[in-house]
Amino acid sequence: MTVRFGLLGAGRIGKVHAKAVSGSADAVLVAVADAFPEAASAIAKAYGCEVRTIEQIETSKDIDAVVICTPTDTHADLIERFARAGKAIFCEKPIDLDVDRVRACMKVVADTKGKLMVGFNRRFDPHFMAVRKAIDDGKIGDVEMVTITSRDPGAPPVDYIKRSGGIFRDMTIHDFDMARFLLGEEVVSVLATAAVLVDPEIGKAGDYDSVSVILQTKSGKQAIISNSRRATYGYDQRIEVHGSKGVVSAENQRPVSIEIANGDGYTRPPLHDFFMTRYTKAYANEIAGFISAIEKGTAITPSGADGLAALALADAALQSVKEKKLVAVG
Amino acid sequence: MTVRFGLLGAGRIGKVHAKAVSGSADAVLVAVADAFPEAASAIAKAYGCEVRTIEQIETSKDIDAVVICTPTDTHADLIERFARAGKAIFCEKPIDLDVDRVRACMKVVADTKGKLMVGFNRRFDPHFMAVRKAIDDGKIGDVEMVTITSRDPGAPPVDYIKRSGGIFRDMTIHDFDMARFLLGEEVVSVLATAAVLVDPEIGKAGDYDSVSVILQTKSGKQAIISNSRRATYGYDQRIEVHGSKGVVSAENQRPVSIEIANGDGYTRPPLHDFFMTRYTKAYANEIAGFISAIEKGTAITPSGADGLAALALADAALQSVKEKKLVAVG
Amino acid sequence: MTVRFGLLGAGRIGKVHAKAVSGSADAVLVAVADAFPEAASAIAKAYGCEVRTIEQIETSKDIDAVVICTPTDTHADLIERFARAGKAIFCEKPIDLDVDRVRACMKVVADTKGKLMVGFNRRFDPHFMAVRKAIDDGKIGDVEMVTITSRDPGAPPVDYIKRSGGIFRDMTIHDFDMARFLLGEEVVSVLATAAVLVDPEIGKAGDYDSVSVILQTKSGKQAIISNSRRATYGYDQRIEVHGSKGVVSAENQRPVSIEIANGDGYTRPPLHDFFMTRYTKAYANEIAGFISAIEKGTAITPSGADGLAALALADAALQSVKEKKLVAVG
Amino acid sequence: MTVRFGLLGAGRIGKVHAKAVSGSADAVLVAVADAFPEAASAIAKAYGCEVRTIEQIETSKDIDAVVICTPTDTHADLIERFARAGKAIFCEKPIDLDVDRVRACMKVVADTKGKLMVGFNRRFDPHFMAVRKAIDDGKIGDVEMVTITSRDPGAPPVDYIKRSGGIFRDMTIHDFDMARFLLGEEVVSVLATAAVLVDPEIGKAGDYDSVSVILQTKSGKQAIISNSRRATYGYDQRIEVHGSKGVVSAENQRPVSIEIANGDGYTRPPLHDFFMTRYTKAYANEIAGFISAIEKGTAITPSGADGLAALALADAALQSVKEKKLVAVG
């Protein structure tokens, strides 16, 4: 079976997914839609597909699945439309910044028996997958404490920050999902601290740039998340899981691994400086996983419920900061 | 000048300090006291010093300084007695498990213009000292986020746990001190989570074995502490400090650094499995620092006030767990 | 300009190059030829090109360049034919196992002003390129000593060994080229030792499986090469260059970089176990470099002369082993 | 039993051994002799022993063993004298720079049934000991290829070089001994290359500063040694042993193991810059091994025969360079 795709949104991340779909032996990119005709045309030309409108794709008989890479505030609507249209849906995170809107959207998906995958790409990073596999293989015994360090090379423009829903919903949400992915038990409480240490403009926009979060599950398993909007040494993405029998960790990734030594010491190059180069394989694996789930008819993960759960943790973290207390969830 | 020492307590840690004092070119071990005569005699024989009673040491004219390694519940009394006797005092942490008792003791030290150093040995670890030096040298700019991972190879006996004051006062206290040492700004709030994941007996004794803590300073700097009473791979002691210009970290230490590779992968040996071998140099540096401060008449660090501040953070962490909220300190 | 390619040979390495050519924005794969029609058809189908005979490709007006991936004993003949046909040529190493045959072939290339690149893919590995760049940037001062460790996961079949020209011409030749690439000065003498330690069958076939080589340049710069046909921990490919101001090294590569620690120690996974996965990017970069040189009309490196020089070092190494003496070259 | 020591030579290395003897629970330093009375007195004062002449020590009834740290050209004579005097002897390497003189000295030791240990301290480095233990434990199967990288932080004064016997007898000799220690089979042939790349003055003195050596055993096991008299990044001392089942290696050592990362990359401090700090534990272990062998009456290793064998390899390496051929030994 070949899964026939429509792509909604031809921006930066749209191109990544277009390449992944086109490069798959089990999928074909049939059409692309974008509010900017030039963007759509560029992808159409590069990958040999048609330009169509969203409405056309919605009713296209030659399209089985869509990849939604449009602006965040359109996600929920598009998911509902394409769920009703019977298309399998891959949607970039988040579904929406509002939990109630996400719940309503999930209901439509459920009612239409829709297939929905949410774009938590990090679950598909080969190194993080290997961490998860080590856990599943019993290498570290029972999971006890997850530590996630996640720092961006630099803060996005303040305009973006204003529309982002705040650091917990925009940035930490990936780590909330990763914590859930690794803890193996639902989180029941959230403690968070937040500050503006990187750029006062972020504070003026009502957001934070440096946060620390502790999650805890019912049985007491803990996850610690450390976020900063700026890391001078590159895109810092580390995971460590401590268990009853040992610990497993995933190191940072760098484009080249050489080392130069002299009187000043031993120096290795900085890390990847961009999420797209850091997670190149993760994006490819993600789409491959979506295609595979469609072909085999297996459950799709991460699901809409995963998206909702991560968003609920983000909301709880913000509440914890504001109210200076532990916030129960779930 | 040669500083003449009396040693109070000839147990495990007493031996460590006896060796450090004897090995110093600027100090001499004059006498040792212990409730168990055999223990005192063993040290006396090994290092060529006399056995005396505590009372005798208190009034000895040939003793300038004492090292207190007796049981915790005697620390505050002995500090007061030897402060009044005009001896410089090195006391193993903690001064006392009760903040009010510590405060009273501090008052006596202040009233007698006593010299007191508290045994937070980790400040003297060469690697952690190098971390601090990197900060002081401006290598990472302004400190923003401190991450401390501290896991013991195995839990102490439950009998010890019962007398220990609990994990925050017994184990995390070292990390509270290290966080203060590195943050460069006083902590104003504490968030903590605690659980029993390692040994149910610890829970029955009213304590925890797995805790996560977030500290925050007035300007928003954050410190995260992760503790477990058990780490199968050895004595896990890591520090990382993230700043505006970079990050500095201290790796774990192992007795031998070889690597064996075969079809199963690349394997390095486990870490040190005991705090005394891990911190051998730290203990020697610590006593050297005490001797140097006495000789030069300089301020003694870490002081009784440092001991008190760390204990207050421990109390706040416990309160945060119990009351499920942020606890303000200072 | 789009460079139009014909592919000669549709085997394992042919597929790698077909993918690289097809994936390039500046090239198109027009046709493929192979003695086995099924192999050619498979590539033709996968990448949308035609199946043609070698003779047809030789006279195809719509083909600018060829990639030669046929058996070694056909390389020299094909290079001569396609040089005469005016096609740019990329040929897998070696040109031939016989130095005189290579020289004759080079003469034809020179006489026809042919463009020839020899497939020393390792020059295009991102990590080794970064090593070379560090040298070129003056990071280590004058090059003094190059150390190359190159061990295969496992020995090839003895049948292959018999046709291979021996370990120096088949395996070490890559290291000879890399040494030349990094020394920056021509080698003038070779010392070599060889033994059969891995598999007696290799010895019965007249070859060796474990060799050590020292190269020296006129000014005394040295290169050490260590080869084994078997490494239980994967494909071991390390380079270190020591210079007057420092040292630069390229680490081994592994598919996933996690680490698991427990009472047995800290374990990272084995290395890549196959040259094609280890050098995926090198193969892509190599073809990109070939395309770029054709487009820009710049000199092509590594050239036929580079192939000849590496082969001469292989012959000298074998002579050194046989005659138990230093062999002068160049 | 307490072994009673006399120390011959109170220079830099004499101090190291005085400290090791004094720190041992099984030994006591009774007397020290040196041509410079002040040097002897300093050690006598620091460790509470007497100053005696060499002649006095030779006839002292209260001395069981001597440590010879006098200038190289006195070693053989002193070994013979103290062997005849019935003292156990620890002698710094080398016994002599001339193989025949060493043989004559060995004969005296044999005739007197003398106990002699030669100071190849690296055999006692904890990391190298662990490498050897991994081999003995079968972790890497049969040893096939040993790689030793040994580079000094900086060249010694040319005056020292002139008296040193040349780089092979002065510096590489440690690596020859280590190769023998790890190969587990006697070397039968030597290939060597040498050059002057660091300092032309060394060349004018008739010596080399950059050498590469290949050793081979009867069964074909190989050892590669790479030496430079200068390494800007510190005292470079690495060992790797490749075997049929895997590889074991010992990493370089540094005084502090922190890492600082910023936009320029990840930097760790340089290595130890002095052999005495690098090999602090090795020196202590070495004397402990000597004392233990005396107490238990077990065979002493490394023996005079080990010293002789390493010197023979040094001579063979020099011959290989001069005559441009493989030199057979043993």
Image (cartoon, coloured by chain):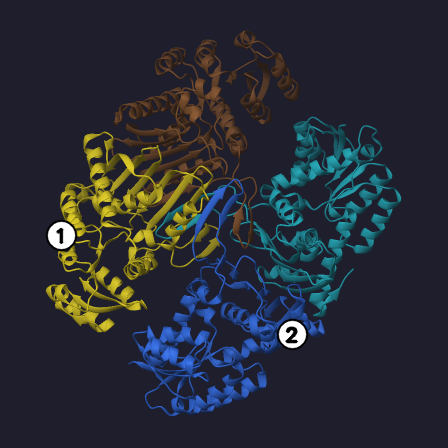
Chain colours: A brown, B yellow, C cyan, D blue
Q: What element carries label 2?
A: helix
Closer to the camera in the image, D45 or D310: D45
Q: Residue A94: which numbered mark, if any?
A: none
* Residue type beneath disc 1: Asp
**Where B223 falls versus D274 (above or below)?**
above
Q: Quadrant of residue B119?
A: bottom left
Residue under label 2:
D318
Instruction: Give the quarter of the figure containing the C terminus of chain D.
Output: bottom right
Residue under label 1:
B73
Q: Is mark 1 on a helix, strand or loop?
A: helix
Disc 1: CA contacts within 10 A as few (<14), some (14-19) or many (>=20):
some
Residue mark closest to the camera, 2 vs 1: 1
Residue D247 x/y as whole percent: 50, 57
Residue A16 x/y as whole percent: 56, 25
Residue B70 in view (yes/no): yes
Residue B208 x/y as whole percent: 21, 41
Disc 2: CA contacts within 10 A as few (<14), some (14-19) or many (>=20):
many
Residue C238 in view (yes/no): no
**How far is disc 2 from disc 1 in space, using C-alphas?**
70 Å
